[in-house]
Amino acid sequence: TLTLNFFEIPEADAGTDLISCLGEPLFLQAEIPALGNASWSSLSSGISILEPGFQNSGISATATGNYLLQWKVINGACSDSDLVVITL
């Protein structure tokens, strides 16, 4: 017996790039995926994602600069990701 599983390719939308002042509260603006599970990760050092599994997570940085964050959606064996730049 052969079992095949088919998964829809999810669509990730990390929202728009954000500009703010260091120390000001800042919240990410990803779209909740229609299917699958999603989480944030940082591709830059010096910034923390306070709730990686929450689409509107707060972030905290230690210095001014540009930070690259990834919103990745996984549905079974399929995935999609989108990037945002945070400028502080």
Image (tube, helix red, strand yellow):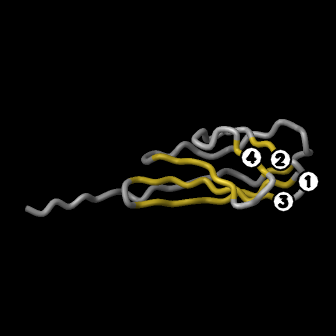
Q: Residues within 10 Å of mark 2 (few under 14, many from 20)?
A: some
Name the amino acid type tagged 2: Ala
Give the distance between the C-alpha atoms of the residues marked 3 and 2, in whole angstroms. Answer: 10 Å
Query: In the image, is 24 to the left or to the right of 10?
Result: right
CB of mark 1 within 8 Å of CB of mark 4?
no
- Upstream in sequence: badge 4 or badge 3: 4
Q: Badges 3 and 2: C-beta atoms under 8 Å apart?
A: no
Q: Amino acid at mark 4?
A: Ser
Mark 1 or mark 4: which comes first in sequence?
Answer: 4
Q: Which residue corresponds to mark 4?
A: 48
Which numbered marker is on residue 66?
3
Which of the two labelled residues, at mark 3 and mark 2, occupies the earlier sequence position? 2
Residues marked 2 and 1 touching at CB (< 8 Å): yes
Res. 8 image quadrant = bottom left
Give the amino acid at mark 1: Thr
Q: Nearer the viewer, mark 4 or mark 3?
A: 4
Q: In front of the other: label 1 or label 4?
A: 4
Q: Is residue 36 above or below residue 50?
A: below
Q: CA distance from mark 1 to mark 4?
A: 13 Å
Residue 79 horizontal side relative to residue 30, left or right:
left
Q: What separation in Å lies between label 4 and label 2 (alpha carbons)?
A: 6 Å
Is residue 80 toward the left or the right of residue 52 in the image? left
Residue annotated with mark 2: 61
Q: CA distance from mark 2 to mark 1?
A: 8 Å
Question: Which element type, helix, strand or loop, lies under badge 4?
Answer: strand
